[in-house]
Amino acid sequence: MRCHDCGKELVKGAEYMPYRVGDSGFAKCRACHEADPVLRGFQEAEVYSRVVGYIRPVRQWNKGKQAEFGDRKEYVAEGRAC
């Protein structure tokens, strides 16, 4: 894991502050956290998918459809030789 601000590698036993933003995790080393404890400079990704024939941002779906989206499994079809 790396510090979100300075990019320094956080080695085992290092002191750091973990941050949770949605499903994403970030961390700041002790020095960066003491300098500025607020997590800045990140952007949440917009996820689009198809529901009932329309491509819409998943965050705009109702809770039932969002739960269904979370349960989906991705399958990759193997290519065939022509």
Image (cartoon, rainbow, N blue to C red):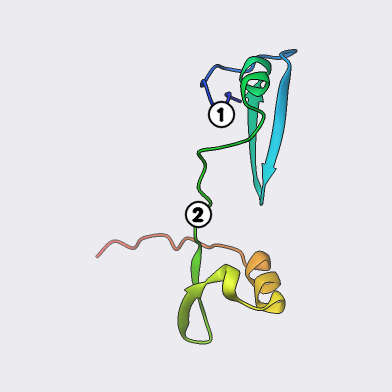
* Percent x, y of residue 75: 53, 63
Residue positioned most to the bottom:
52
Residue positioned most to the front:
35
Residue type pointed to by label 2: Ala
Horizontal side of residue 76 vs 68, given as left or right: left
The quarter of the rendered structure image containing the N terminus is: top right
Give me the residue at 49% from left, 60% from top: 46
Picture quarter containing residue 74? bottom right
Horizontal side of residue 18 vs 81, given as left or right: right
Give me the residue at 69% from left, 37% from top: 19
For mark 1, what is the residue?
A: 4
Q: Alpha-carbon neighbours of circle 1 within 10 Å: few (<14), some, or many (≥20)?
A: many
For mark 2, what is the residue?
A: 45
The quarter of the rendered structure image containing the C terminus is: bottom left
- Closer to the N terminus: mark 1 or mark 2? 1
Residue positioned most to the left:
82
Give me the residue at 54% from left, 17% from top: 8
**Image height check: is 50 above or below 9?**
below
Looking at the rendered structure, the secondary structure element under dot 1 is: loop
